[in-house]
């Protein structure tokens, strides 16, 4: 018997004929309305031959692949009792359709009575064609069960012969990498206690040479903020899979009789239209979540690169006044407001306003900010503690560590053990008081170091810590309806859909260098829609790279996200202030498009140019950037095509130059740029393209396309 999940242009075929676990025999493009007889014939047609020198029946590649069935790869479930491995052979108990608000869903129950295990699997294929999968394991024995791994494993076809994922570092997050898929296993493990800057992020397998707009791909993302593993595996027996799951340390998770463990959700995506097809499905799915931000994303000013630790009421009040004049809607006070925090060596954990810097507390600044019509936001780093703090001196036992062997400090700090109820209560009480008394509408929630030797109650503690962080965020938001929170972690380290169930955006990177941001933001938006990506205009000279850029390039880069400023605008020139005011006004005009439209990345033949944009759902409005990210080897720029536009519409092309035109290096621009009318048929724009000016390196041309007529 075959169960057909079908939604959002995707089909998933589950062989539920038993007696063993169900098996996914197909995951890919929509098969349409298919009869039960045709589905059965497809299942029979897929049965392989039995070659020499192997077991006598084909290997059953179940939802949780089992070594007991002869599976050669990484199993989906590994566990131990009293030091002895448990080798499950699960049998199908029931298949039950689930009521789903979006798409189609099914729940599958399996058990192995002798091994003392039951597994309940949920598969939800949503309206965007994204498959959500998770498993729940229950220990039905009268003895404890040590869980080693419970992970999601999904089949991919032999045509998926090239791997793509991401890596990175601080200020260089989400850099893409490629390699051919050969026999063996490509495994990415994250053991940092949080999703790290070098996480795989989105693990893809596709047809060789897949690009933004071309190629068939299958991909997975793990919605989890702790240790994790993703892998792609291929074997000569025909096994070819994508896998993902929480990475558990030995002894980290013991299930007592009757206890259960449930995996994080794995989001699985298929596309026949390159990586943009993956992003389109993911963005639509993410935007459909009930927790997704619903109000317009406010223009932000964050004070970090404006004043650093040099807090002063008069200075910050003046900064707020200038910000309001520019059109800023959210003013965020960064690090340095609490305890003895004059630098990064002290006071983390002491979440009380500094009487030295703020003798009257934050009230006067918060009141002035809100009187100016802006929302007041505040930086916090609740999960960390400085050894030089009142909290550590009072409670050294609150550190997430072996009390007999503390880990090395990093950035002068250690990690608090939030799985201790007294620690979470302490943090909730202090944060809740601040939010309520200072009318805080936004918290920039930072996390600036890895968890090293994270021990909770004598065991590895990342699993418990991650759940405790989630619980604290949930509790704080429930107590303060409307509070928004940003996930910031050494910049863009903790970026995943687990933390984004409880936060409203991520800080993409500590690097505000617009050239580096062009690359970092491209990787980030492969998964996340633009409205979840904090993208700010920094000072003329970047504090992370010492590189300088024109304001026009910095603005063009930051517009493609949740726009903001990180700069002492009170000391900026009148010309720069005028440019910022125009940029904020443009952002407010464009954000309904940028934060609801379809992302388009152009496969441009000149690698020195990055071309991307957003097109409205009705194809009547679009904005594109042509960014020159390096010196071109072409003497004459290659014409740029603009996919995503409607071939039938006629579009008026406008230049957007809120902070001035980009610098060019030619004697004569393309004639169309100076013609009286810049109206073109969509077919011309998508298939022929437009000739480009000779842009200087590190410059960007912003183009708006507006359809004419009905």
Image (spheres, helix red, strand yellow):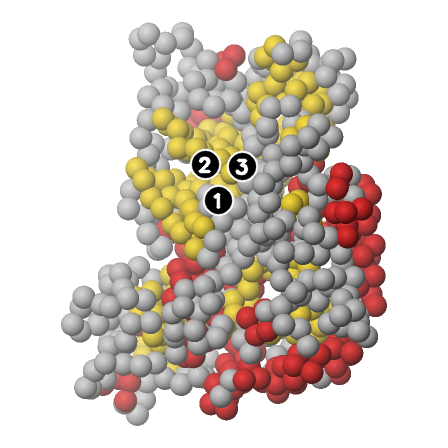
Foreground disc of the pair 3, 2: 3
Specify few, some or many for label 1: CA neighbours under 10 Å numbering under 14, 14-19, or 20 or more.
many
Is disc 2 placed on a helix, strand or loop?
strand
Specify few, some or many for label 3: CA neighbours under 10 Å numbering under 14, 14-19, or 20 or more.
many
Is disc 3 placed on a helix, strand or loop?
loop
Measuring 61% from the left and 79% from the top, which residue is drawn there? 328
Q: Are marks 1 and 3 in contact (CB under 8 Å)?
A: no
Q: Between residues 281 and 260, which one lies in front from this camera angle? A: 260
Where does label 2 land, which residue?
A: 188
Position above or below: 110 against 3: above
The disc placed on residue 199 is: 1
Q: Between residues 552 and 295, which one lies in front from this camera angle? A: 552
**Residue 12 visible (yes or no):** no
Q: Along the horizontal axis of the image, is 69 left or right of 212?
A: right
Q: Position of residue 604 (x, y in %)?
A: 28, 62
Q: Between residues 103 and 559, which one lies in front from this camera angle? A: 559
Q: Position of residue 410 (x, y in %)?
A: 57, 47
Q: Along the horizontal axis of the image, is 503 left or right of 687?
A: right
Measuring 22% from the left and 67% from the top, which residue is drawn there? 632
The disc placed on residue 507 is: none
Position above or below: 17 against 289: above
Q: Are marks 1 and 2 in contact (CB under 8 Å)?
A: yes
The disc placed on residue 191 is: 3
**Residue 692 visible (yes or no):** yes
Q: Position of residue 34 (x, y in %)?
A: 48, 36
Q: Position of residue 17 (x, y in %)?
A: 55, 20
Foreground disc of the pair 1, 3: 3
Measuring 61% from the left and 34% from the top, which residue is drawn there? 453
Q: Along the horizontal axis of the image, is 207 left or right of 445?
A: left
């Amino acid at each position: 018997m075959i169960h057909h999940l079908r939604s959002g242009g995707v089909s998933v075929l589950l062989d539920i004929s038993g007696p063993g676990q169900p098996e996914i025999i197909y995951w890919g493009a929509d098969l349409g309305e298919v009869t039960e007889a045709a589905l059965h014939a497809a299942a029979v047609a897929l049965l392989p031959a039995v070659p020499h020198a192997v077991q006598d029946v084909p290997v059953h590649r179940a939802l949780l692949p089992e070594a007991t069935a002869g599976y050669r790869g990484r199993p989906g479930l590994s566990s131990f009792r009293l030091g002895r491995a448990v080798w499950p052979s699960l049998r199908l108990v029931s298949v039950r359709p689930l009521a789903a608000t979006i798409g189609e869903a099914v729940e599958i129950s399996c058990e192995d009575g002798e091994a003392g295990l039951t597994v309940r699997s949920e598969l939800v294929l949503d309206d965007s064609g994204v498959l959500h999968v998770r498993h729940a394991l229950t220990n039905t024995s009268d003895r404890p069960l040590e869980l080693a791994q419970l992970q999601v494993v999904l089949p991919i076809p032999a045509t998926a012969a090239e791997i793509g994922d991401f890596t990175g570092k601080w200020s260089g997050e989400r850099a893409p990498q490629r390699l051919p898929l050969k026999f063996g296993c490509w495994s990415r493990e994250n053991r940092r206690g949080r999703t790290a800057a070098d996480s795989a992020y989105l693990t893809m397998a596709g047809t060789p040479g897949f690009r933004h707009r071309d190629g068939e791909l299958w991909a997975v993302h793990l919605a989890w903020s702790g240790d994790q593993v993703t892998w792609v595996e291929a074997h000569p027996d025909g096994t070819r899979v994508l896998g993902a799951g929480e990475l558990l340390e030995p002894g980290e998770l013991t299930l007592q009789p009757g206890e259960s463990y449930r995996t994080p959700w794995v989001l699985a995506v298929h596309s026949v239209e390159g990586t943009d097809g993956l992003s389109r499905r993911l963005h639509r799915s993410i935007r459909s979540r009930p927790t997704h931000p619903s109000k317009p994303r406010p223009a932000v000013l964050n004070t970090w690169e404006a004043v650093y630790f040099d807090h002063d009421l008069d200075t910050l009040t003046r900064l707020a006044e200038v910000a309001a004049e520019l059109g800023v809607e959210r003013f965020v006070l960064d690090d340095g407001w609490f305890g003895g925090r004059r630098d990064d060596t002290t006071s983390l954990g002491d979440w009380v306003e500094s009487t030295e810097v703020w003798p009257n507390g934050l009230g006067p600044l918060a009141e002035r900010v809100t009187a100016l019509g802006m929302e007041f936001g505040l930086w916090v780093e609740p999960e960390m503690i400085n050894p030089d703090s009142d909290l550590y001196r009072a409670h050294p036992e609150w550190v997430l560590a072996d009390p007999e062997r503390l880990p090395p400090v990093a950035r002068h700090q250690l990690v608090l053990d939030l799985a201790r109820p007294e620690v979470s209560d302490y943090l909730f009480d202090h944060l809740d008081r601040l939010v309520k008394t200072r009318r805080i509408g936004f918290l920039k929630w930072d996390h600036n170091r890895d968890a090293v030797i994270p021990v909770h109650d004598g065991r590895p503690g990342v699993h418990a810590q991650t759940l405790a962080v989630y619980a604290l965020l949930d509790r704080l938001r429930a107590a303060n309806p409307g509070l928004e929170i940003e996930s910031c972690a050494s910049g863009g380290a903790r970026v995943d859909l687990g933390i984004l169930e409880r936060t409203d955006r991520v800080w993409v990177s500590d690097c505000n260098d617009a050239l580096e941001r062009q690359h970092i933001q491209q990787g980030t938006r492969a998964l996340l829609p633009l409205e979840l990506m904090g993208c700010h205009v920094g000072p003329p000279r970047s504090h992370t790279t010492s590189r300088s850029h024109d304001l026009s390039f910095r603005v063009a880069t930051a517009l493609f996200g949740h726009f903001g400023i990180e700069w002492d605008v009170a000391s900026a020139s009148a010309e720069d202030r005028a440019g910022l005011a125009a940029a904020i006004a443009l952002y407010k005009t464009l954000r309904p498009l940028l934060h609801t439209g379809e992302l388009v990345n152009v496969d441009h033949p000149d690698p020195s140019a990055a071309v991307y944009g957003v097109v409205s759902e009705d194809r009547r409005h679009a904005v594109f950037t042509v960014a020159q990210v390096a010196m071109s080897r072409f003497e004459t720029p290659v014409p740029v095509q603009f996919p995503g536009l409607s071939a039938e519409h006629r579009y008026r092309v406008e230049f957007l130059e809120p902070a001035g035109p980009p610098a060019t290096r030619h004697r004569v621009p393309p004639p169309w740029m100076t013609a009286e009318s810049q109206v073109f048929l969509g077919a011309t724009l998508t298939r022929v393209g437009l000739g480009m000016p000779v842009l200087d390196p590190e410059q960007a041309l912003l183009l708006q396309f507006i359809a004419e007529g009905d």
